[in-house]
Image (spheres, helix red, strand yellow):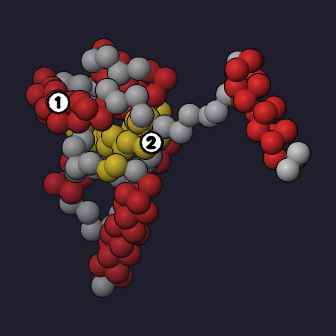
């Protein structure tokens, strides 16, 4: 009974986090899966990775987005190991995207390790071993110094200020 409550609470938590994340970004169902205890793309998942890239190519190649690679591992094993495994998986996907032409400065890694969840079966673990791409609008910082270096813009600002204060 207690394990069912824990599972439901975990599911509610992850669902609420997904909703919050979706409000801030363009979340997709496409993902980069991994085989058990693997840190890189294997032949079994290669076609899925290629299809995921094709499905999301317009977002991956859009300079208005940054790509956050949220990587996960199954909850078997120790937390420290799962965290490192997740990080290595995200690095493998990052390199895959760079090889496909995505600018590396737009790719961020967010590794997650999974806690042990009681009552979880082997088939449940397989769904945890993946990297999820999340797209967020890239907010460029305004370069005010460059604006002031532009004499025409500076003169416009001075004229606007004079008009305002001389009224």
Depth order, front residue of 14/137: 137
Residue drawn at 40 percent across, 28 percent down: 63
- Name the spot of residue 64 as percent of width and height, x first: 42, 34
Residue drawn at 78 percent across, 33 percent down: 159
Q: Quadrant of residue 104?
A: top left
For label 2, count other residues whose C-alpha is less than 10 Å away and answer few (under 14), some (14-19) or many (20+): some
Q: Quadrant of residue 70?
A: top left
Q: Mark 2 sits on what residue?
A: 137
Residue drawn at 41 percent across, 20 percent down: 103
Question: Tag 2, which secondary structure?
Answer: strand
Q: Quadrant of the N terminus?
A: bottom left
- Name the spot of residue 146 as percent of width and height, x first: 70, 21
Depth order, front residue of 74/70: 70
For this view, does 145 lie left or right of residue 112?
right
Q: Mark 1 sits on what residue?
A: 54
Residue lying farthest to the right in this orientation: 166
For this view, does 63 lie left or right of residue 123?
right
Q: Is residue 29 visible?
A: yes
- Name the spot of residue 41 as percent of width and height, x first: 23, 25
């Amino acid at each position: 009974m207690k394990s069912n409550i824990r599972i439901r609470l975990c599911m509610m938590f992850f669902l609420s986090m997904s909703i919050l994340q979706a409000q801030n970004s363009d979340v997709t169902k496409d993902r980069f899966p991994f085989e058990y205890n693997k840190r890189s793309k294997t032949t079994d998942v290669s076609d899925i990775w290629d299809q995921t890239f094709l499905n999301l190519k317009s977002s991956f190649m859009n300079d208005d987005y940054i790509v956050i690679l949220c990587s996960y591992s199954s909850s078997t094993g120790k937390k420290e190991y799962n965290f490192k495994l997740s990080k290595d998986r995200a690095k493998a996907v990052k390199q895959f995207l760079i090889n496909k032409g995505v600018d590396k400065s737009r790719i961020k890694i967010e590794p997650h390790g999974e806690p042990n969840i009681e009552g979880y079966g082997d088939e449940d673990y397989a769904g945890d071993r993946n990297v999820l791409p999340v797209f967020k609008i890239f907010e460029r910082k305004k370069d005010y110094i460059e604006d002031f270096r532009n004499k025409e813009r500076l003169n416009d600002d001075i004229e606007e200020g004079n008009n305002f204060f001389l009224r």
